[in-house]
Image (tube, helix red, strand yellow):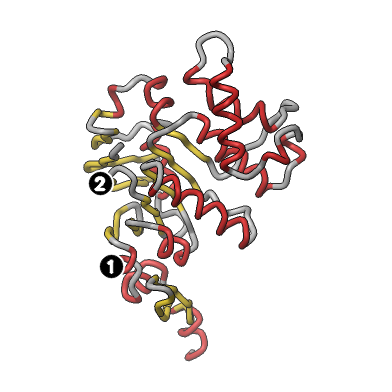
Amino acid sequence: MTVKVEQLEFSYPNAKILDNIMLDVSMGECLSIVGPNGAGKSTLVKCIIGLLLPQDGVIYIDGEELSKMKSSEIAKKVGYVPQSQSSIFPVKVFEMVLLGRSPHILWASSEEDLLKVASAIRFMNIENLSMRQFNELSGGQQQKVIIARALAQEPKILLLDEPISNLDIKHQSEVMELVKELSTEYKITSIMVVHDLNIASRYSDKVAMMHNGQIHAYGKPEEVLTEENISNVYGVDVEIGVIGGKSYIVPLKSRRNRAETSA
């Protein structure tokens, strides 16, 4: 499925967060949204999933206006992985993932629902956790369970808000390889907020770099993640090299630090 955002505007009472956002993501593409803290990245994702209502602009899901879709329709098409998740009630991992089947369940879960849950757990390689209590898991383990819950929905679009923020380098790589596989092999359109520019460079088909609520640059990773763009948006000088055909970014010194040194 495709995602298209046209002239999106969103404001809180005292601040404008998103200003004239334009995006176009094709089926099976993986888009990374990057930018400094406070740039509006998470707000944009929450608008695309329908958790926040923009004041202006239009969001299209496979050509259909999001504002005209029922929440049950959205839930069947779009999976969402928030930054973190907690449960105030004791719940096993299998039961947590089963919640992802809610849009498809009329009265009680069927054998098909249970098979879909088992498949999602197996795909995320967390079978050894399936009978553990969710709240007893580490932050990284919990994040993988939440991704499994989203996959159990069988979404055509997957939105991930900082999906690897609590993971060590091994599990970061594992999760990102799985997200990429979902895009390339299963044609699931993925939109994710990430802070690590090297992750965005390696795993994305497109990158949207945000700054002050606007899209500063949008396109292929090598077109967006340039020394000039990073310097202008982050205020950091970087050096960019190439490994395995992918750019890697090494931060050198922030403008503030350089100014302090020369003062």
The quadrant in which the N terminus is found is top left
Question: Which amino acid type is shown beneath numbered disc 1?
Answer: Glu
Mark 1 surroundings within 10 Å by alpha-carbon count, few (fewer than 14), some (14 through 19), many (20 or more): few
Q: Which mark is residue 223?
A: 1
Q: Which mark is residue 37?
A: none
Q: Which residue shows up at 46% across the image and 84% down it?
A: 259
Q: Which mark is residue 24?
A: 2
Q: Which residue shows up at 51% across the image and 15% down it?
A: 105
Quarter where residue 205 is shown: bottom left
**Disc on the earlier residue, 1 or 2:** 2
Q: Which residue shows up at 26% across the image and 41% down it?
A: 5
Q: Position of residue 240 (x, y in %)?
A: 40, 78
Does residue 108 appear left or right of residue 88 in this picture? left
Question: Does 232 appear above or below 113?
Answer: below
Question: Which amino acid type is shown beneath numbered disc 2?
Answer: Asp
Q: Position of residue 120 (x, y in %)?
A: 56, 36
Tell me the element at label 1.
helix
Front residue of 253/168: it is 168
Q: Which residue shows up at 36% across the image and 19% down it?
A: 70
Front residue of 38/13: it is 38
**Mark 1 touches mark 2? (CB < 8 Å):** no
CA distance separating discs 1 and 2: 16 Å
